[in-house]
Amino acid sequence: MDRVLIEALAVETVIGVYDWERTIRQRLVIDLEMATDIRPAAAGDDLTHTLDYAAISARIQTYADDSQFELVETFAERLAALLREEFGIPWLRMTVRKPGAVPEAQAVGVRIERGTLVDVSA
Ligand SMILES: Nc1nc2c(c(=O)[nH]1)N=C([C@H](O)[C@@H](O)CO)CN2
């Protein structure tokens, strides 16, 4: 199935398990792959028939502004559920990276896939 992409979306949020992390905002970087059939939008050149990556990016920003989880797992899981429900996304793959959390690593984080991937192409 086709995908609409958002790559390396940077957000600031309260995230972390340690006391010092509860008082600051840290950067998370999100990659999102969303399954959808893009042909209806392409046929009519019509944004209303596809997943609007600008609207979804804006929703992720407000979610990050308002959330204060300890684990990146919780941040990712709840965001995936919210996006699937609000935007009717049948399947998504989301990577949430926390740069700088482990100084020796470029980034650490989680990757999840949620929903059902139905191939309607061909
Ligand atoms: N699997 C996870 N491991 C860790 C997390 C996390 O969210 N998921 N968080 C931390 C700390 O908050 C860390 O990022 C502070 O540097 C440790 N391990």
Image: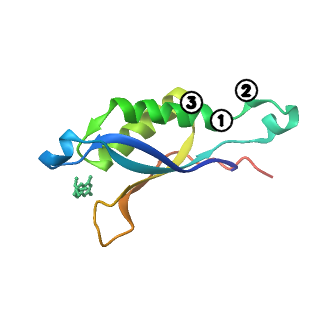
* Quarter-of-image position of residue 54: top right
Between 63 and 48, the residue placed more toward the observer is 63
Q: Quadrant of ligand 1?
A: bottom left
* Residue 93: percent from left, percent from top: 51, 51
Q: Is mark 1 within 8 Å of ligand 1?
A: no
Q: Amino acid at mark 2?
A: Thr
Query: Residue at 30% of width from left, 42% of height from top?
Result: 25
Query: Residue at 37% of width from left, 37% of height from top?
Result: 78
Outermost residue toward the left?
A: 19
Between 55 and 12, the residue placed more toward the observer is 12
* Quarter-of-image position of residue 43: top right
Q: Secondary structure at mark 1?
A: loop
Q: Is residue 88 visible?
A: no
Residue matched to label 1: 51
Q: Is residue 93 visible?
A: yes
Query: Residue at 39% of width from left, 49% of height from top?
Result: 28
Disc 2 from disc 3: Cα separation: 11 Å
Between 96 and 65, the residue placed more toward the observer is 65
Q: Residues within 10 Å of mark 1 (few under 14, many from 20)?
A: many
Q: Amino acid at mark 1?
A: Leu
* Quarter-of-image position of residue 65: top left
Q: Which mark is residue 87?
A: 3
Q: Which mark is residue 102?
A: none
- Tell me whether circle 2 and circle 3 mark residues in contact (CB < 8 Å): no
Q: Residues within 10 Å of mark 3 (few under 14, many from 20)?
A: few
